[in-house]
Image (spheres, rainbow, N blue to C red):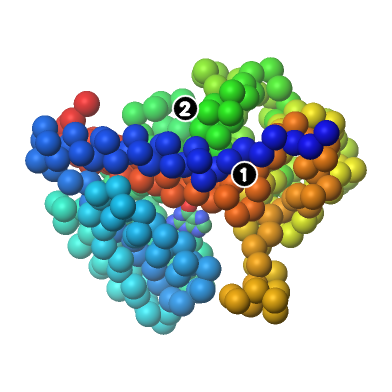
Amino acid sequence: MSAKIIDGNAIAKEINQETAMEVAVLARNHSVQPGLAVVIIGDNPASQVYVGMKVKKSAELGIYSVRKSLDKNASQKEVLELIRELNADTKIHGILVQSPPPPQIDEEAVVSAINPLKDVDCFHHENLGKMLAGDRSGFLPCTPHGIMMLLERSKIDPAGKHAVVLGRSNIVGKPMMALLVQKAKGANATVTVCHSMTPDIAHYTKQADILIAAIGKPGYVTASMVKKGAVVIDVGINRLEDPSSPKGYKLVGDVNYDEVARIASHITPVPGGVGPMTIAMLMHNAVKACKIQKGIK
Ligand code: GUN
């Protein structure tokens, strides 16, 4: 049997349509337009692509956006100055700084300088704390939130299931763990997090009803690591050299798709799985940020 494909493009499209409708209502009833600032420091090619996609999607949904590009040698002071300007800019409701920044930049300090009400990535500790406490008045981090929406809209209820998360990054692994374990509808999972210091990772993955791979290792999860009928979510976006492709590379996930699709019940493809959901939830957060700042319910 072959797994059902969880179509991230289709689900993201639905969510984006809902966001576009909210943007239209904000314009009609409140004469406001959500505004998003996307900050990129340096010339990391993958980051350039992601930032371009975020700006393009904003325009498609009617969200005002600005791209702020800083040189790869930009100083911490310059970045903080830009954040101060954007915090004060009333047209801008959401600010994100594309990660990873160049090594001279203290990312933690930059994120802490963003007004928490404009922190659409949910990287600020105030928003992370709210999320951990189950307080839904703030933002949720885009990729983990996108994965929760993929599960919900595919009618997969994590309640009582064993979810195994591979990776403990602040962007995906740790918040993913927090959202899945939450005492809330669409969550209530039992969660195991595996990482670089976990011995025998396959021991855990083989027990997973829901397996979320976010470790940045191309094709890491093989069929022998997956329980029959598991739901497999692939967060990896790895560039592999491919001279036969016009771009010179191809994108592959952290899961060996062909193998695992034969035994999983559901699987997300790469590309077209989690990726579009990250952007859809960012757009959702930009609208939420606008509403919070304008006091609109
Ligand atoms: N780099 C990879 N994913 C993300 C994300 O969701 N937000 C930001 N700001 N940077 C990223």
**Label 1 beta carbon less than 8 Å to ligand 1:** no
The residue singled out by tag 1 in the image is: 173
Q: Position of residue 43 (x, y in %)?
A: 46, 77
Q: Is mark 1 on a helix, strand or loop?
A: helix
Identity of the residue drawn at 51% across and 33% down: 149
As shown in the figure, which amino acid type bears the numbered disc 1?
A: Gly
Classed neighbour count for the residue bearing mark 1: other residues with Cα under 10 Å, few (<14), some (14–19), many (≥20): many
Q: Tell me the number on the disc at residue 133.
A: 2
Locate residue 191 relative to residue 228 in the image: left or right: left
Q: Position of residue 62 (x, y in %)?
A: 24, 49
Q: Can residue 114 be seen in this view?
A: no
Q: Where is residue 146 in the image (x, y as percent from the top left)?
A: 51, 39
Q: Which of marks 1 and 2 is in front?
A: 1
Q: Quadrant of the C terminus?
A: top left
Q: In which quarter of the image is the N terminus?
A: top right
Q: Where is residue 253 in the image (x, y as percent from the top left)?
A: 68, 55
